[in-house]
Amino acid sequence: MILAFDIGGTKLAAAMVEEGRVVTRRQVAMPQHIECFSRAIDELIADMPVPERIAVASTGFIRNGHTHAVNQNIISFWNGFALHAFLAARFACPIVMLNDAQAAAWAEYLACDAPIGNLLYLTLSTGVGGGLVVNHQLRVGSTGLAGHIGHATLCTLPVDGRMTCGCGRTGCLETIASGTAIARQASFVFGESIDSREVFARAVSDSRAERILVNAAHAVAEAIANCVMLLDVECAVIGGSVGLAPGMVERIRSALQAESGLTQIPVTKAVLGADSGLIGAARWAAGDDPSKERPAGSAAHHPTIH
Ligand code: ADP
Ligand code: BMX
Ligand code: ZN
């Protein structure tokens, strides 16, 4: 069995995964200090069976066994954190690591019923993550950054005008459509501190809350359209707690209709819900790849075991 971790800006999940299915799952809030992170991991794995392999889906990008932050404001200790060494001190088995949205994209691609070879996965969560499968292959990129569409800049603007992103760019999708950005814009509009869940609740009866969500959906749709023009992706799969929240996928679908006719692709909810990252990392680590069964010419992936 594979022990998978999904490490996000808000939550930390661990699961035993067998043949692509979650057997046991635990989740805690993501600690913001390294000592608490260490304690949380030890608690999560306390009575888990000894795994054959460790699979990690992590926020940030992975390079040489270290995590690196794109957005420096998400987790204070994440930029240059030696996650591989940290895990190797606890487990003697191979360790495979991926970005969280890349992992989720792989899981959602493998879960597709239809033969789709080009897919964009977007997580609307603490940040906005992206994963790309192009021609049946997960794109990790030369330095691990591939798919970071949350840091593509757009014409849509945040309703509070605060466009500076923690990645150093201005006008990123993440400043408009992440849970953090939705809460920030709503706190500005309502003049009180409210979180993203509350914005969804208020949107039922308050047009100011609805406007923030519709604007976020337009930003996501613009990013999807950019991705269609760049890579000719066939579908966009939406995950993350904000992406899976009531009506968000429907708002994104409507917003995409306002884009060019050339960019009209299906927009669907992640079929694996909150487990896409865990399952994708585990299946990547296991080497699950249907292209291995395809004839010569289509490349199979080889997980990097550190
Ligand atoms: P992570 O970023 O750790 O992967 P999530 O996917 O749960 O975690 O995303 C966390 C973000 O989603 C936070 O900004 C949180 O406030 C927001 N959020 C959590 N639950 C909901 C919900 N039911 N509706 C809307 N927003 C939510
Ligand atoms: C940020 C970035 C991405 C990540 C995305 C979603 C960091 C630490 N993370 O854009 O690598 O995929 O958030 O991550 O720079 P989550 O934390 O919202 O799950
Ligand atoms: Zn950015």
Image (spheres, rainbow, N blue to C red):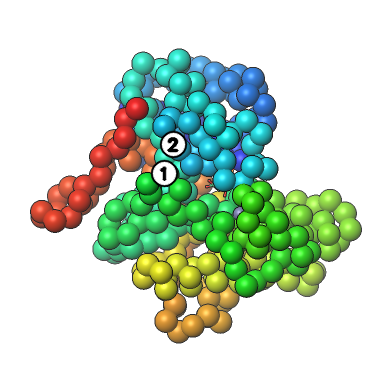
Task: Count neighbours of disc 1 (C-alpha within 10 A) and say few if under 14, some if 14 to 19, many if 20 or more.
Answer: few
Q: Going by the image, does 134 lie left or right of 29?
A: left
Give x and y (percent) for residue 226: 48, 70
Q: What residue appears at the point 79 percent right and 69 percent down from the top-left corner?
A: 208
Quadrant housing residue 92: top left
Q: Secondary structure at mark 1?
A: loop
Please name whichever residue, 302 or 249, is drawn nearer the observer in this view of the structure: 302
Give x and y (percent) for residue 282: 36, 37
Q: Which residue is mark 2?
A: 63
Task: Count neighbours of disc 2 (C-alpha within 10 A) and say few if under 14, some if 14 to 19, many if 20 or more.
Answer: some
Q: Against 102, is 50 above or below? A: above
Which circle's residue, 1 or 2, is located before the other in the chain? 2
Check if mark 1's residue and mark 2's residue have beta carbons within 8 Å.
yes
Q: CA distance from mark 1 to mark 2?
A: 6 Å
Q: Which mark is residue 245?
A: none
Q: What residue appears at the point 37 percent right and 67 percent down from the top-left corner?
A: 231
- In the rendered image, the residue lying farthest to the right is 191
Please name whichever residue, 170 or 247, is drawn nearer the observer in this view of the structure: 170
Q: Which residue is mark 1?
A: 143
Q: Against 265, is 41 above or below? A: above
Please identify the quadrant where the C terminus is shown.
Answer: top left
Q: Against 102, is 114 above or below? A: below
Say which amino acid is labelled 1: Thr
Quadrant housing residue 196: bottom right
Q: What residue appears at the point 20 percent right and 51 percent down from the top-left corner?
A: 299
Give x and y (percent) for residue 18: 33, 34
Please name whichever residue, 199 or 261, is drawn nearer the observer in this view of the structure: 261
Q: Report if residue 103 is visible in the image.
A: no
